[in-house]
Structures are given as structure tokens and as C-alpha cells.
Amino acid sequence: MVSPKQLLSVIESTLLGRTPPTAAQRIELIHAIRHSLPSLKALLSYPPPKPSDRAQVQSKEVRLPDAAPLSLDDHDVQIALKLSEDLHLNEIDCVRLLVSANQEWGFLGREPLEIFRLSAGLWYTERRDLLTSLYMLFRAVVLDQGLDADLVADIQSYLEDLITSGLRQRLILLIKELRREEPTGSGGPNSDSHILDSRGALVERKAVITRERLILGHCLVLSMLVERASSKDVKDIFFALKESAGEYSGALESSKHQITFSLLFSLVIAFISDALSTTADKASVLSNDASFRREFNEIVMVAGNDPVVEGFVDCVRLAWVVHLILVQDGNDVGEIAASPLSTDTKSVFSCLEVIFANNSFQFWLDMILHSAAYQNEDEDVVFMYNAYLHKLMTCFLSHPLGRDKVKETKEKAMAMLSPYRTASHNQIIEGSGHPQETYEIGRQPFVSVLEFVSEIYQKEPQLLSGNDVIWTFVKFSGEDHTNFQTLVAFLKMLSTLARNPEGASKVFELLQGKTFRSIGWSTLFEGLSMYEDKFKQSVQSPGALLPEFQEGDARALVAYLNVLQQVVENGSPIERKNWFPDIEPLFKLLSYENVPPYLKGALRNAIATFVHVSPIMKDTIWRYLEQYDLPVVVGPHAGNTGYAMDTQVYDMRFELNEIEARREKYPSTISFINLLNTLIAEERDASDRGRRFIGIFRFVYDHVFGPFPQRAYADPCEKWQLVVACLKHFQMMLSKYDVGEEDIDAVTDQSQITILGQSSPIHHMQLPVIEVMKDFMSGKTLFRNLMGIILQGVNFLITERTNQIYGQLLESAVLLSLEIIILVMEKDSVVSDFWRPLYQPLDVVLSQDHNQIVVLLEYVRYDFQPQIQLCSVKILSILSSRMVGLSQLLLKSNSAIGLIEDYAACLELRSEECQIIEDSSVDPGVLIMQLLIDNINRPAPNITHLLLKFDVDSPVERTLLQPKFHYSCLKVILDILDKLLKPDVNALLHEFGFQLLYELCVDPLTSAPIMDLLSTKKYHFFVKHLNSVGIAPLPKRTCSQALRISSLHQRAWLMKLLAVELHSAEIADPNHREACQNILSELFGQRNTEYGVDHDASFFITQNETGSISKSKVLELLEIIQFESPDITLKCSQFVSNLKYSSMAEDILTSPTTMGKGVYYHSERGDRLIDLVSFRDKLWQKWNLNNSELNSFGSEIELNAIRDAIQQLLRWGWKYNKNLEEQAAQLHMLTSWSQIVEISASQKISSLENRSDILFQLLDASLNFSGSPDCSLRMAQMLTQVGLTCMAKLRDERFALPSDLTSETITCLHIIMTKQLSNGACQSILFKLILAVLRRESSETLRRRQYALLLSYFQYCRHVLDSDVRTTILEFLSVDEQDNGDLDLEKMDKDQAELAHANFTILRKEEQPILNLVIKDATQGSESVKTMSLYVIDALICVDHEKFFLSQLQSRGFLRSCFLNMSNFSYQDGGFSLDSMHRLCTLEAEFSLLLRICHKYGKSGSQILFSMGSLHHIASCKALHLPMKGSFRRHDTRVEKNSADLDKQQMVVAPILRLLFSLTSLVETSELFEVKNKVVREIVEFIKGHQLLFDQVLQEDISDADELTMELVNHVVGILTKVWPYEESDDYGFVQRLFGMMRSLWSRDPDVFTSIGSARSEIQQKADVSISRLCFSLSSYIYFLVTKKSLRLQIFDHASTATQQPTLASLVFFLGSLATVLDRAAEEKYLLLNKIKDINELSRQEVDEIITMYVSHGYASSSENIQKRRYMAMVGMCKIVGHRSRLIMLLLLLAQNLMNIILAHFNDSNSLKALSDAKEELHSLCGRLIPVLERLELVNEDKTGHNLKVFHRLARSLKEMSIQKLAN
């Protein structure tokens, strides 16, 4: 069973969509209709109460169908029984209703009465949905909605079956039953009279029932056109009509009148359609039933006592007569006349007599067609009514009987009515000659027939097309008029027939020609001229009175003028220019007092239509007005100084106040203001800012609008016509003219104006726009009167609009009032600060009475006119931006709840629309969304908090949102986004809905409540829309580009929402945790293993049953935006062939005056677009300026050319805007995609399996798209950034514990078996990355990122294992694994070599373009791109084979250019500016490249650099002379100056020293005796040239030096120890400093190695290695001096010698320290290795202790499981073991050097002799040495991991010699 709500939704989406329904929609619709047939057949028929069901409910346990038993409490039972009694429903159904209402609204915390009303409201909503569904099905069949014929036929067949099965009888019965005061109707005496509707608003039950009856009536009318009515149907409808007509007079609601009309027109349509039936499938029913005709004729001819009922019966009689005439249309008229005894003939004649005797046509006019109910009925329904009235009258007038009867009435009318009646001057003034009185006397059927025909075609002039019957009737009725009443009626009919171009042309020709003897245009103009001559003669005769104006003539002239107005207004723009060349006669009577005001009104109305004929005509009208019309208010026109003619004797003020006010009718004033408004609206010259209209404005302001509330009005319509005209004038003044800085001084002292002179007040009047602003900003007359209109309230407006004929005028007045308020608010901020305190901003004036603000905002409830809703929303938007306490104001006024519901209802109503609103600026839904978004960041509580139902009485951030409990915008928005109905119509609502939720999620106050709400299981918001929105197919650009743009933005905001949830969600909350897990699972198609939760999902790339590959959603999202961006570079010259016009457009678009405003505007999304209206206006303006020499508006040919050109330019502008919007949307979606990918990859991906595969696929997809020609530059930048993130995470993944462990044991295999990508995948990355780098469109910013990605890739390929975990350690630890075949380090090395070779091969294939690009960037780019390019070349050198890239660099002269850059390095600002730092970075990169050449190619590389004069260029580099402050030790990096010094050390000094140290490798190739070789000489010269640098480094205290300082010291010492031995003199003191460093280091205790026996941090481990390297360099230097330079050391220091050289005793002491350190390091390494092997046996406490000691706190989280913590502990220990191994190796070499030095002394004969001279010292030395050597002999190979045979042999040899020396 399909619910009514579902049925309605399906029908709306299928039948009311903008595009034809798809096959799936059609099937769904037919399926829904078929399943709803039982409900439609038994329409609004529900099971009644049953005693057994009542007893079951009272037992408090109810079993609903297909549900478990349901327990009820006392309140539930009470409410269910109350529902059953009030609605006459079955008790079980009432319980079901309660359950449904609870699901919809939530009953927790609600009162029983509220629950009852909500449940009743839900039931009535279901009824309404069912009725609306039926009504829409009828409309789809009857009305032409452009649907497929087959679909319409299918629906029609179902409807025909329903009608056949009794639906029509059910409709008639319901219309009658529902009006009765009983539970099944409008409610019994004890029933609750109110319910709560679907919006939570309290409504009257009777109003709901009345609306249902009206829908039923409309369904009844439409059913007549689906299936012919039976005789029973007609009789039942007729009796129902009489019953309904009985309450017609007493009913005030229009809806009840409309119900009566539906019954009446059901009969009209039944009679006419049955009689006209010509198709076989729709055969006549009534026409063939003679007994029915007799029976119904008797019924319809029964006379009644109620005149209203009798009037409706007369209307039925008219339709019945036409039916009978049509039935007998086949018989000859003569036969009918000759057969008086025929029943049907008698019926026709008797009915006609009654109809014309009662003047049924006048009843049609007065009670039906002119009623407010008819005027306010649905447009389609009224069209259908008028169409059948058209058929009725066409059939009636085309039949001889009808024509004869009309002819008879015409003759009678001509004979009875008096031809003329004089309206004297006194009657006109006093009102005794009220024209309407004369018009009402003797109203005859012929006049009513003419007016009836006029009324039919007034709204539907298209029915006249091809209607020869009516035009024949026109010719017949236009002949031989003997009185003005029939003439006026005839001319009124002509004015109606002229309401379309075809009719206007025909009417003009009728009156232009000789069709009628006495009726024509000549009659009009002759009459005007005749009276003008009479009045002129009278004025020229002294003492003569003005002649009286005949009322008949006045009425006839008014009727003529109305025809003239319609002919000109609706005529063809080309033809009408030639119709009335001379319009001066229309002006000549305007100034005469005796001319009736209504005639003046008609004259001005006719004149107003000529304004639009041509610009020439407009200027002519201005001239004639100044010449003829009343003088007091019309100031001189621009270029004219003359005022009015001297013949004018009185002015408009006199006519208004003395003539019209007495008559209480104001046609002259209304027409006067309307005419001037029309003229002013057409003025294009705004240079004088309305100064020439000051007089007009003052008249309207002071004399018309000011006192309008105090005036009396005979006709309320005229009151509101007058108000609308005035308001249009004020609105025009505000909209046409701006307030600027020149108006700041507009506030003047009024007393000075009075003193200056009172004779010419206009001279001192200010501009109209300023006067209006001052009035509103001070709360004067205009403001008070306008607010008086508005303060009547929205409820009053709704009532008047639906029940009064002037309702539409009142609606227009309210709309104009709201628009004026908005215009004032938009302008008052310009001058408010300067006009204070006399004038205040309008919001301040409004806030003086809070009720004014409340009423303004409540107009959002008015849904008859969307413009009023728009104005109310705009006013709230402006007020919310100005008034901080607006929310509190609304709360205090007790209007907040209603306002919240009104805005929600407006938004919901907009979401249910079926037609697209092209202009988003007039879309109420979009405006409300923008209002909510704009107010989010304003001080709390703000309007957004209020309308979304946040708790504004307490801190907003503590709100617990309950959208189902409260009807608010939040509930509506969530429903809209949940259903996503009508995506083409509601695209912007969906888009801004997602944006609003995103903005709420990132706002500090609202983020917690809204994210908590969205993460609940009730909504599943985050994941649900990935399928419904995220990966849905993107609409085609050719079909709907606007929908395509919005769809992209929707996905963008959705992904931003997901990113916010992933980034900011509180994982401790189970809802957020599950939401994040589901998001990741949906995005990446993975099983989420974090927090012990396993989500079933496919692999990242899965294979479905058919074998095809399905991608994860994150890749599908990227594929959506992989299309070529639309072209926004298309020039307008390509759209316009004429260069003159295209250049004119270019000038406008690029002019500095229009770049900021005017031609351009920013859309609601922030896109800078062309304002097409402004663009068009400026094109016309510029063209007129350039062609001012042409006559007025240029020649016709030139005019047509510019029109065509402007149309083409506007098409180009539209296309440009759409393309720009689409490009921005594409970029927006990619930005959001990159955000969610980067957040997922960097923060959340660790919870997924196959992470490396995921990252590779993301990287691969990003590179694919970034290298595509469809990818724009900005998109490529973002994609490259995503690639960088993925590459970095891939590098991290290699050293992370696998998440798919099947056991709890951790082994070294988990370190070795990393998630390294396959070689093929790596090669694919490199290949695609190169293609992306070489893309056609590029920029330095993009290439910087691409170069960074390339470097990251090379780093990934080089480091399969953690660089701090040595391979030897893994080999040692993995003996068991190797036995099992699980580990093959050799294979890993082989794969690594193959990958490196493959990388080189790929690069070599593309070497030409890649090197061209990189070298160009490195030499010609900005400093930042130079730096990155140099590092890329560095990476290329790393993968180089056979010196290929090196030779390329040499052949291109690149290396030489690098040296030249070093030599030419300069700085002007001391090196402290950003530019200098960039140049230093480039310099550092160049040094890094040279150093890489040295390391890569060894001594050959160094030789190449040396041969190119590298030392000379380095020495001349000015960077070495940058000021260095203080020492080289690390300063606090938070201090910028010290940080800069550190950067210079790291960027300049360290690279130079590294390169210099590399070049010292060439020293080892020289012969020992060639001490003056070139290499040594140049290095020594460099040292001498930079002595200060070397001295500064050597003076550093290494006891607390940082890593960089230690590196510098090591390099300096290494360089000096390599080359300084060749220097013969030590004038620079370097030797003594080296000796001093030796003495300092070698005399220390073992704690010089700080990490031994202390805290074992990784930094300290590295420091130990640095100290060991330094000591080894120093020992090598001493060894060289001892062995090559014959240096001999003393045994002990002597006071007599002041040498800095170390002694043998210090060497022995240091050797002892080394033995201690070596022993400790080996023991620590051994213990760590054992711990690593036993890692799975350690307790969590022991593991935590290891992590605390060896692992950085940034990488260890206490929340990790034991597996991960063991893995981290094992990796940390492996790194420490690696450092220990390096330290042990250095210590062994150092000890070996020291032992060799001592051994050299013992073996040298000269040294031996010197030693023997100091025998005691020698013995003492040997005594100290032997224990040390014994300890060194005990060093264990197993613990150190090194082969110690040579080491032990050396120790033993030295030990033996020491023993011998000691023995001697």
C-alpha cells in the first residue's frame, strides 16, 4: 500500500517536473496509482469506531498490523479515544495515528492537548495529500501540461475506472457531508475546533474542511471532462448546488463561494461537453436520454423564493438551454418553430423567457464573474471556466434561436432607454449626478449580454483567435445604437476584444473603416474637438459660463478612450506607430473645470499608452502636458521654460480637494499620477537627479498621499489605486536616483529657508529622493502613512486578498511599501552619520515601536505574492546585520515562535515548487538560506540561532537540537537534504543547505550541537549523501548547466562536511567515532579495524561478480571533476561580427569605472559575474552617446543592427557567466576533495587496511588528472599537493606496523616486510609525474610542488628500510626467518637496484625536455624555483649511471653557471631580508648539488669540480662574509635574530665546509713528498683566506655543542688534518689548536660520551658518534705526524716545556676511557639485541619503559594496543643498536690508531732512546698501558659484531712490548 504522502511525491516528481518523466518515473507513477486505487475509490472513507476495538484500547495493550504488541499509558488511551470520538475513526487506527505522529514530531514533553492536535493534524494532512493527488491526476488529463500522450492515456484510463466505480458520486456526497457539523464533517458540538497542521501551526478545523471541499469541487469539475456525467450525477450536482447556494449570501469566505462555483460549472461543463461530444469514445449521455431532459426540465423550471438560489438556477437554465439547442441543432429551425407541441422546443422557449426576464447574464456578472472569489480562484480553473463560458456563448450566439432572442432584447433596449442625460457642473461637484446611478437605471438584458461577453474574454483574449461567431456578433451588436448605455456596453466589449494583437488590429480596422455608420475613431476625435471648441468659445466670451457636459457624451467618450487605450497598448509595435499620428485632441480638455473627472481619467489613461509607442511620442506627450494640463504641480520639462497656458483657471489641488473629494471618487488624480509615473519611468537622463519633478513630488506628497487616510472613498478600489499610484511614485524616486556624498550637507536650517523668501518655495525644496529619505529617517508623514498600510498585518491582508475585489490592490500597496522600506534602508547608511541627530537610520526609527519590526517580518507568511515574502526576508536580512539584539526583541514580543514557523513554512513551500526560479535573487528559499549563512558569525544569539531553534535563552553551544520536536528551518532543511526531491528545481536549496550545515559545523558556537545531531544514527547524514549526492552522475552541460554547477557545489560542501567531521569529531563519543569509521569505509571501500570495530566493505579496488573493476568512492568523486573546464577566455568579438560593437563592449567591461561595480556583481557564491541588465543598459547608453547626431533614436537599419548586436553580446555574457561559475564550481569541488583526502591520509588512514594500495591509487589518480589536458593550472596545483601528502604518507607507511597482523607476535620481519610499492607501481608514478611536469600549461608555483613530489618520490625509492635501522642488525636478528625462507635481503637489494635502474631509464628517455625545463628553472626562474630545480638535478645525479646526467650538465655549461652564481652572490641588506634568504637557499642548493657530485662519482667527481676552479669560486663567494653573531652553537629558534644566524650557518658555512672536506679526498691521491701539489695548495690558501671562520669553529666548546656545531667542528678538523700537515709553518696556530683539542678530549673521563650509562635518547646517541668521529680525525692527524712527519710525543707533561702536544700518557689514559666506553657500548648493544629477540615476552610495563627511553614522545601514544607498542619499542631499539654499532666501529678504529701511535714510538729507535732516558716515566706509562691493553683484549666479537683478529693482535703486540719495556 502506497501512503498518500508517497503517492503525492511520486505524482509531483513525475507530472510537474521541468523535464519529461523518465521511463522509471512513469513506471513508478503507474505502480503508485495502481496500489492507491482502493483509497481513491473509497475516498476519505475510514473504518468507524467499534466497541471491541475500544475495549482493546482501554486495556492499554494494542496489537497493530505487522507490529509487536504496543503498551499504552493513560494519556495515550485518553487521546486515542478522543481522536476516535472527534474524527469518527476506528480506535485501533487512532493508535496507529498516534504512533505515526510520534515518529513525525516526538511526543516527549508535550501536553495531551498538543499531542491530540498534532495527531489530528497528521490525519488531515494524509487526507489532503490524497485529495491533492487525485486533483493533480485530473489536471494531468484535462489540462495541457505537455505530458506524453501515452502517459496521459494511462492515467485517464484509471480515472475513468474510478469514476465508473462511483468516484463522482463520492465527490458529490463528500461536498455535502463535510459541511455538516458532525464528527465526519466539520466537527460535532463537543469536538476540538482546532488542529496543528504539518508545520505545527494552530488552524481551525472548519478551514481545513472547507479547503478539502474546494479540492473536491475542483475534482468534480475536472471529472466532467474525463468521463461524461450521468443523469443521476447531474441531478445530484444540481441539488447540491441549490443547497450550497442557500448559504452563499451568508458566507464571507471566498472558498465557500468557490465551492458553489465548482458545482455550477460542473453542470455547465456537463451540459456543453455532452452536447458537443463528437468522439466515439466520449459519446453523449444526456443528449440521448429524452426522459432525463423532461425530468430535469421540470426540476430546473421550478421557481424559488431565495433570489440568490434562483439566480444560480437561472445560470443553470442558460446552460440547459444551450444544451437543448445543441441537441436539436440537427433539426431545421423552421421545423422547431412549426412544432410548438414539441417538449424540447417548449422547454427552450420557456427557459429563454425566464432567463431574459430574470436577466441571468447580470447575475453571472454581479454574483460570479465580478466576485472576489472568482477573481482570486486558481488561474487554470478560471481559464477552464471561461473556456466553457466561451463555448456556451459561442453556441448560443451562433444558433438562430439565440440570435433572434438577442436581437429582440436589443430592439427592446433601444426603445426603452433614454438617449442622453446631462451632468451639470453642480452635479459633478456635489455628486448628485453620480454617473453610476444613471448607469444602473433600467439595466437591460442586451447590455448585460454585451458585458457578459466582454467579461469572458477579458482574462482569456486568446479564446478570440479564429472566433468568427464573436466578430459576427460584434458587427450585429454595433449597429443602430440610439442611446449611450448600449453604445458604452458595446464599446466596452470592443475594448475587451482588443486585448491581444490580433484583436487590437481588428478593432482598429472596425473603427477606422465604415463598418458602423456612427461608431468610429472619427467620432471620438470629433467629439473631443467639439467640446474643446465650445469651452474655448465660452472662455473667450466675457462672463459666459462653461457649457454643460452631456453625461451620455462623457460616458461614450470614456468608452471610446478605453477602446483606444487597449488598441494602442496591445497593438503591434510596428503598426501602432502609424495608427494615431495626432494625439493633441486628447490633451485639450484636461484643463477645463466642467469636464467630468472620470473623463479626464480616461483621457490620461489613453495618453499613457502612447508613451511606449516611440521616444518621439514620449517627448510629444511631455510637451502637450505642459501646454494643456493643470499647471500647479507640473514643473518645466528639461529644455523648456514655459509653464502652462493662460487659459487654465484651476489646478489639480482644487480638482482633488474640491471636486473629487466631494464626490469621494478620484479618477482624475489617479490617472494624473499614473501618467506622470509612466513618463518618469521612461526617462533615461538621471543627471538632474529628479530636480525637474520636485513640483510633482510635492503635490503627491503633500496633497495626495499625506491626507489619504482621512479622505472618504465611495469605492475602496479607488482608495488603493490612489495609494498604489503614490507609492509607485515614491518608489521610482528612490530607485532611479541615488543618495551620494554630495547629499551629506542636505540637512539645512528650515528657519533660514523661511527668511530667504516664501514666494518661491520650490526653489528651496530639496530633491525628491532626499525628501523621502528625510521623511523616513525622522518618522514623518510618508513613513507614518506607509507603516499604517503595513501595520494592518499579514492576517488582514490575507483576509482582504481572498475575500475582497480590491484585495489585489491592497496587496500591491503592501508590496510597494515593503520595497520602499528596503530602498530606504539601502540608502540611509550613506548619510545617517552626517544627518544625526535630527535624522536616524530607518532601523532606529523602526525600533522605537517593536511592533513595527514584528509586523514587517511577519509578511513572510504571505504566500499569495512571493515578492512580499522576498521583501520581508530582505528586511530581516538588513535588520539582522544592523540590530544586535534583534533576536531578544522578537522573543520579548512573543512573536519568535510564530516567526520561526513562518520562515520554516516559507522555506518548505519553496522546496515543494515544481518550476525553476531562474533568478536566484528572487528565490525566497535562497534568500532564507543566505540569511541563515550570513548571520552565523554575528553575536549570539543571532537570527540564525533563532530560526534554527537553537536555545537562545542559554549558551548556544550547549543546545540540544531536536528538529523533530520543533518545526523550524532546521527541520525543513534536514528534510530537504534527506529527500533531495526535484534536484533541478531545488538545486540551490540543496547546495546552500549543505553549505549552511558546513558553516554551522565550523562555527565555534554551533559546531558541537550540529555535529552531534548529524552524527546520530537517526540521520546517518555524513555517509548517506555520498551515494545520493557524492557519486551521482553529473548533469550534462548541454542539458542544464545551472544544475551541473550547483551539483558540483553540493558535492564540494558535502565533502567539506565530511572533512570537518573527520578532522574535528570527538572520537571519544561513540556516535562520532562510528560516523568517522563509516565515512572512511564508504570513501575508501575498506574494512575499518580501528577501535576494534570491523566494518564490512569491499577492498579499495574490488571485483564484482561480472569481473569488472569497481572503484572506491573517493576515486569516483575525482572522476566526476575530470572534465575539461569551460572556456572563459572566449572574447565577445567572436560572438559579434561588427568590430565596432565588440570594441564598445570591451570598453565597458574593462573600463576602470565599471571594474569595481556597475557592470559586475558578486553572486551569492562569491563569483564575480557580468550584470547583464546593467551591461545592456550601458551598451545602449554608450551607443546613444556615440550616435547622438542621428535623429532621436537613429535610423531603423542602425537600430536593428544594434539590437541584434546587443542580443548577441548578452548571449555571450550569459555564456561567460555560466562558464565562469562552472569553472569555479569544478575548482571548489576539487578543493574539497583534496581536503578530505589530505585529512584522511594524514590523520585517519591508519585505521584502514591496504593503506599503501589506497595511497598509491590516490597518488596515481592525482598524477593522471594533473597531467591531463583537461586539468587547469589551479587544479593541477591542488592535485600535486594531494600527491605530496600521499607520497609523504607512503614513506611513513613503510615503517608502520601492518594493520592486518594475524598473530600477536612481533618479529624483525615486520620491519623488513614493509609496504613498499612494487617496482612497476613506482615506475608508473615516475612516468606520470614526468608527464605532469612537462604539461603544456604550467607555472612556477605548480612546478615547485611537482619538483617537491619528484624529490619525495626519489627519497621513497632510496629508503626501503628505515635509514636508522642498519641492514647488519636485521641480518643478525633474522637468522631464523632466513631459514624459513621468509626473508631475503639480497633479493630486496636486487629489487632496489632494478628500481633505481628503471628510474634512470625512464628519466633518460625524457632527458631532453626534462633537463631543458629544470635547467631553465634553475637558471632563469625565481629564487624559490631555482632552489627546487637544483635539488631535482641533485636527485637526477643520485640515480645517474655512467655519468650520463653529469656529462649533460657539463655539456650544457650548467656547472659553470653554478660556480658563476656563487662568485656573483651579493646582498645589500645584510642578508636579513626575505629575498636574501631566498638567495641563500639557492646557494645552499648549489653547494648541495656540487657535494652530491663529489659523493656520487667519488674522486672523479671531485676532480671534475676541482678542475673547474671550484675552490676559487667558493673563496670568492660573498656569502661567507655575511655577519655571524656570537658562536656557532644553537640558539633558541623562537628568537628570530638567532634563528637567522643559525640559518646562515646551516645554509652557507656547513655546505661550504662539506664541499671542501669532499675535495680533500683528492689529497690522498698525491704523492707524499709533493707537498706543494695544486690541490693542497688551493685548499690551504682557502683556509688562510678564511682563517676567522676556521678559528671561530675551532674555538667552540664541544661539551654542550648541538648537532650542527659538531658537524662544523668535524669538517674543520677533518679538513685541517688532511691538508695542514703539508704546511711547513704554523703561523696561523691551527696545529696548536688541534693539539689543544686533543688534550682537552683525551684527558676526559669516559663520560665525554654522554649517552653511555645515562639517558639514551637518539640525539645523545648521535652526539656520541660525532665525538667519536672528531677523536678519530684527531688521532689520524697525530698518527700521520708521527709516522710521516716523525713527530715524537713526550711521555708526561713537564713544567719546563709549554707545548700543547698531547703526551703518551694522555693517549694511554684516553685509550683506557675508550676501553670502558667500548665495553659498555658493546654490552648495551648485546642486551638490546636480546631484548629485541624477546620482545614478545616482555610485559606491557617493560615495553612502556623501553618506549619511554628510546622512542620520541611524538610518535608514541598510550592508547595504542600492545602490538603497536611492541613494534615501536622494537624499532626504537633497532635504531639505538644502529647508533651503537657505528659508535663501536669508530671506537675500535680510534683505539687502533692510538695503539699504532704508541707502537710507533716503541718501534722507533730514536724515540726508544729518548724513552730510555726517562726510564721511570716509561715504566709508569707501561704500567698504565698494560691493564688497558688487557681490557681491550677481552673485547668480545659477538657483542661488538666486528671481526677483532687484527685488533686483538695489535693489542697483544703492544702489550708484549710494554711488558718488555717494563722488564727493562
Image: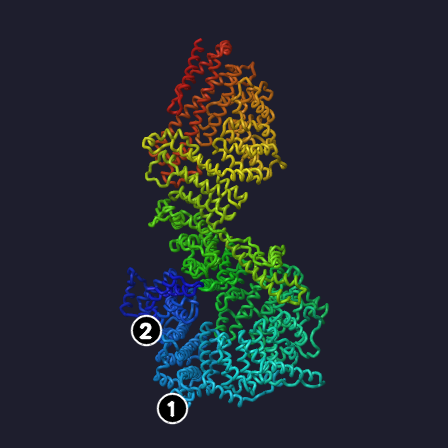
Percent across and percent down for residue 144 are: 43, 70
**Rounded to the nearest whole Å, what is the CA distance between mark 2 and mark 1?**
39 Å
Name which residue type carries label 1.
Answer: Leu
Q: Nearer the viewer, mark 2 or mark 1?
A: 1
Depicted 479 relative to depicted 1302: above or below: below
Percent across and percent down for residue 1670 are: 50, 25
Depicted 44 relative to depicted 1844: above or below: below
Quarter of the rendering containing residue 1764: top left
Q: Find numbered disc 1 in the image and state the secondary structure of the residue it sits on.
A: loop
Q: Is residue 188 visible?
A: no
Density class for disc 2 (Cα within 10 Å; few <14, some 14-19, many ≥20) is few
Q: Is residue 1549 left or right of residue 1078?
A: right
Depicted 513 relative to depicted 1300: above or below: below
Q: Is residue 952 left or right of residue 23?
A: right
Quarter of the rendering containing residue 1744: top left
Looking at the image, do the residues carrying marks 2 and 1 touch, with CB atoms under 8 Å apart? Answer: no
Tell me the residue that label 2 is attached to: 165
Which quadrant: the N terminus? bottom left
Density class for disc 1 (Cα within 10 Å; few <14, some 14-19, many ≥20) is few
Q: Is residue 372 left or right of residue 525?
A: left
Name which residue type carries label 2.
Answer: Ser
The one nearer the camera, 29 or 1130, is 1130
Tell me the residue that label 1 is attached to: 341
Percent across and percent down for residue 336 are: 41, 88
Q: Find numbered disc 2 in the image and state the secondary structure of the residue it sits on.
A: loop
The one nearer the camera, 1322 or 1230, is 1322
Q: Measuring 50% from the left and 62% from the top, which residue is drawn there?
A: 918
The one nearer the camera, 985 or 505, is 505
The disc label shown at residue 618, or none: none
Percent across and percent down for residue 1643 are: 49, 21
Q: Is residue 712 left or right of residue 691?
A: left
Q: Earlier in the sequence, mark 2 or mark 1?
A: 2
